[in-house]
Image: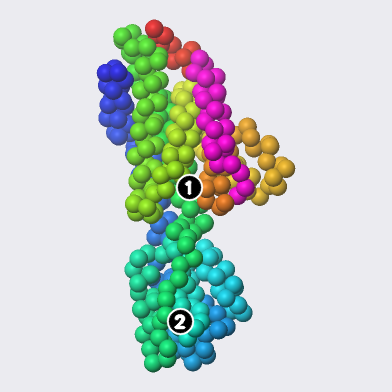
Amino acid sequence: MKKIINLMMKDFVSGTRNRMIQFMIAAPLLFTVIVKLLFMPTVDDTAMRLVISPALPVEMERHLSEFFRTERLESLKAVNSRVEENDAVFGVDYSDGKVRVIFQGNESDALKTAVPMIVSVAVAGTDGLGEVDSLGKEKSNMQEFISSLLTMIVLSISGMMTGFIIVMDKETRMIKALSVAPLTISDYLFSKMFQTIIYCFVFSIVIYWILFGFTINLVSWFLSFTAFSVLGIFLGFLIGTLAENENSAIALIKGLGFILLMLPMVSLFSPQTFQWPFYILPTYWVFRIVTIQALGLPGNIYLTWAVAMVYHIVLLAVLFPVMSRKLRMRKV
């Protein structure tokens, strides 16, 4: 175990000095911050928009229009449906002589407090504000989908980082030096597996924290983290096996990024009966976990997770002996 830890420390030091790995770490985190700023609900894009049910008196709507951009819809059902859409919009209904503010549930606490207060001020002098009603959605589908896709991309990059470090060991002849040390191929590969899992764990926590603070669904996170970790290990070992230098590793990462990350998204637009051509893609199964969790698409998420884990482990079992021959290190 000490040899594995020493190898991981060596990889951490050498990896953080490499500009490509620095970019792999910084780019997805920066992209996550940008997505947070552009796509998540803010005061600017929410506080000025209300959809109004036909039950609300015209006089109240006139008062509200002084504070908000208002739109009267044909029914309360239409108001609820509009509030549930991906952009953040509040609804207003009127029943039993009281005004009711309807929100989706994924808005910030500041908005949940501020908007009803403004509505109350706007209708002051009429019947006042009665209640605030949430549709019970802690996160919108768009938020869930974006966060899951980001997690998928970042955790895949974690595996690609591991593959890039293996290629660095090849290019600097570190592999040759390690082959004459009291170190086996299993020690070497287990160190790479553990560091990929650590990268995945840290990155997934950071991504969720940036997007949603500390409100993490532990079951969803665990299913994603474990499936993506095994996928990351496979991607890292695949790059480490096929690439002989940093240039070929970069080219391979670009190709894998398109084939393994972009192609599964095409399955969203394919009928259920034509999903089978995507089954061979390792990332298809983790993408299925994403779509079941985030978009509510049909499917058993636990069965999908099990298929993803078994498929990735089988791929690793096939790849392991090939990689052992390529690295030419001691087996025992």
Q: Nearer the viewer, mark 2 or mark 1?
A: 2
The residue sitting at 40% across, 51% down in the picture is 32
Residue count near mark 2 (Cα–Cα under 10 Å), binned few <14, some 14–19, many ≥20:
many
Q: Is residue 200 above or below residue 85?
A: above
The amino acid type, in three-letter code, at marker 2 is Val
The amino acid type, in three-letter code, at marker 1 is Ser
Snapshot quadrant of residue 165: top left
Q: Which residues are magenta?
A: 297-322
Q: Which mark is residue 99?
A: 2
Nearer-the-camera pick, 233 or 238: 233
Main SS class of the magenta portion in the image: helix
Snapshot quadrant of residue 229: top left
Q: Which residue is mark 1?
A: 148
Q: Is residue 242 visible?
A: no
Quadrant where the C terminus sits is top left
Q: Is residue 79 above or below residue 120?
A: above
